[in-house]
Image: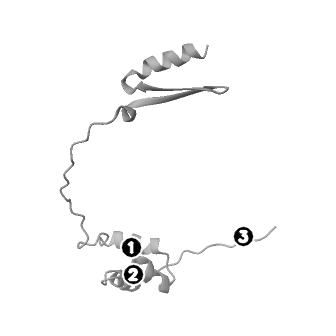
């Protein structure tokens, strides 16, 4: 039986935390790039930033862009139909069934396959 290795929680000073949070706020800095040289997991630094109230950068805000949608063109019958292909030996039967009559198609195929 091997002796279990106890894990000790690392403690960081307030000064180090403040320094790392300040480094994260530098232009072009990322939390991961700042945390790595200090040997700290980026998720830990994200937590510190959240507790310090410095999570979301104010300069990055998505804006809504107006979009115009052209009216849909009249769909062809093939686009609004169920295509059914039945094969038996060398005989192939293809049908286009209206999309708004799928319940009838279901009944038709059920009867056909009895």
* Number of marks drawn: 3
Q: As drawn, is 24 to the left or to the right of 74?
A: right
- Give 24 or 98, whichever is nearer the viewer: 98
The residue located at (49%, 15%) in the rendering is 107
Give the residue displayed 53% in from the left and 19% down from the top.
109
Classify 10 Å Cα crowding around label 3: few (below 14), some (14-19), many (20 and above).
few
Q: Cα distance, mark 1 to mark 3?
A: 30 Å
At mark 3, the secondary structure is loop
Residue 17 tag number:
2
Front-lying residue, 24 or 108: 108
Disc number for residue 110: none
Secondary structure under badge 2?
Answer: helix
Which residue carries the number 3 mark? 4
Q: Is residue 93 above or below residue 50?
A: above
Q: Quadrant of the C terminus?
A: top right
Q: Are marks 1 and 2 in contact (CB under 8 Å)?
A: yes
Q: How is the image coloured?
A: one colour
Q: Callout 1: 10 Å neighbours few (<14), some, many (20+)?
A: some
| Residue that carries the numbered disc 1 in the rendered image | 48
Q: Where on the picture, by quarter, is residue 24?
A: bottom left
Which residue is drawn at the image coordinates 20% and 59% (left, top)? 64
């Amino acid at each position: 039986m091997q002796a279990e290795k106890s894990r000790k929680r690392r403690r960081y000073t307030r000064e180090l935390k403040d320094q790392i949070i300040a480094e994260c706020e530098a232009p072009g800095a990322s939390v991961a790039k700042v945390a790595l040289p200090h040997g700290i997991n980026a998720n830990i630094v994200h937590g510190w930033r959240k507790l310090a109230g410095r999570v979301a950068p104010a300069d990055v805000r998505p804006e809504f862009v107006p979009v115009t949608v052209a009216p849909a063109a009249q769909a062809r019958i093939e686009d609004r139909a169920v295509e059914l292909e039945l094969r038996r030996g060398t005989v192939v039967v293809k049908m286009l069934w209206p999309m708004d009559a799928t319940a009838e198609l279901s009944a038709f195929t059920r009867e056909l396959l009895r």
